[in-house]
Image: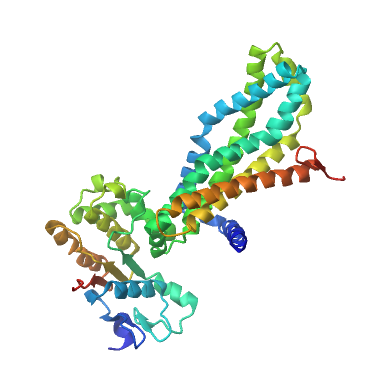
Amino acid sequence: MIGVYREFEGCMRLSGYVLRRLAVLARPPVAESLTRQIYFTGASATAGMVLRGAFIGTLIIAYVIDVLDANATLAVKILLWVVLREVGPLIAAVLVIQRSGTAVVTELALMQISGEIASLRHMRIDPRDYLVVPRVIGIALSTAALTFYVQLIAVGGGMLLSALTIDVPLNEMAGEFFALASPVDFVYSVIKSFLFGATIAVICCYHGLHPPGTSINAVPKAAINAVSQSTLLVMLLNVVFAYLVFGQAFFGLVTAKL
Amino acid sequence: MSPLEVALGYEAPAGRNGPRVWIPLGGSHRAAGLSEPQRRELVSTVLEVNAEPGARLVVLGVEVDGLRPAGRAALRDRIGFLPADGGLISSLNAWENIVLPTGFHHHRRLRGIEATVNRLVGGLGADPHELLSKLPERMTLYEKKLTGYVRIVLESPDLVLAEELLGGLGPEERTAAARFPAVYLESHPGGTFVQLEVAPAHE
């Protein structure tokens, strides 16, 4: 229990450090590190995102219309509520944990064990400035961008593919969607996914910088801790966000008295 | 010797077999005969600019005991450290490793730095075009040491500590690496270059 509290405290301190040291991003090596992180997390992951997004969107519409025998309005409502607000940011977060989170924690833990973190200190470079700040900001921005891709592809691609495979006109679904969607949905999901990304990055960086040992065995242990904790925290944050913004959590089981 | 004339002075607390080093300011020197734990203690104490109670540490003419944190940090900025393996970051190529501290601390100095790097690397027996794009995993030990060394020279510290400078090198590489102190002193005439060498263990 004390260990969990220490890790939580360490992550909070690391988050505070990142917020205080944002100016360090202007230094050329850190700016380059930020660009690499955005490329790795945001740009090179898009192909997989497009496929998954289109698949999920089509699946939801097909399921609602074909299996549940519902109309286009309900299908679009579900697309909006489920994909746009909840599933889009969550899928982006899960993919970021799988791809970038594991890469970050493994890289930093190996650097710690092999003495490269000490080398940075010998150069009078705080490892948090050079390694953590660009990764947290890069992953947060990329997660927000990936969420946008997922939403766009899942909703747009889902409606398009459904129009081709199921007997529902595209313009009817698009009209329903734009009538129901509001800017709050987009702002909500962008802010939420930015926070998801920052949370994942802070947890992975913290575990990477503090592997549970000095042997190579500590690397997978650090990765397991980082992945399980960031997944859990993303789920918790999602519940908190849903409760704060829409007054309900756990798909309506807990509802706020507004 | 007055502390003002000392580049690096360290006396471990009395009563244990700690390192005792007393090196004058300026020029190239060797601190030989240290055991591995003594060398480790000396390096960590100097790089932290903080001696344990009962120990005495003098760096670049300044008694460290009693210095405020800002004074210690200013003193630390004047020390360069070259580990035995060059101390490189494995995900960066030689060029990125070389410019990392300069870009981080003094990014305005990056302008025109390429010519200096090419001159230093070329002058010490390596092909700049070949070396600068290499990742550490593809470098020889000499190339790693050279990369770490060029990185330090660009920072122009007043005191350089080099661990096992010639250790693990072939005859030609040893000759080239033996020129590191002279090349550093040419570019920084008032500086002090100290080679830290561990005494061979006896059975």
How many numbered markers are drawn?
0
Camera-side residue: B137 or B46? B137
Residue at 50%, 49% (x, y): give it: A223
Q: Quadrant of residue A56?
A: top right
Q: Which residue is most to the right?
A: A258
Q: Can residue A28 be seen in this view?
A: no
Q: Is residue B80 visible?
A: yes
Q: Position of residue A217 (x, y in %)?
A: 42, 53
Q: Position of residue B142 (x, y in %)?
A: 22, 56
Way the structure is coloured:
rainbow
Quarter of the image with the C terminus of chain A in it: top right
Q: Quadrant of residue A155?
A: top right
Camera-side residue: B128 or A153? A153
Residue at 34%, 67% (x, y): give it: B80
Residue at 40%, 87% (x, y): give it: B54
Rendered position, B117 above or below B40: above
Q: Which residue is most to the top?
A: A167
Rendered position, B163 above or below A167: below
Rendered position, A149 above or below B22: above
Camera-side residue: A246 or B108? A246
Asked whether, in this view, residue A123 is left or right of residue A157, the answer is left
Q: Position of residue A149 (x, y in %)?
A: 60, 31
Q: Position of residue A10 (x, y in %)?
A: 58, 61
Q: In which quarter of the image is residue B153?
A: bottom left
Asked whether, in this view, residue B3 is left or right of residue A239, the answer is left
Asked whether, in this view, residue A231 is left or right of residue B52, the answer is right
Quarter of the image with the N terminus of chain A in it: bottom right
Residue at 35%, 51% (x, y): give it: B90
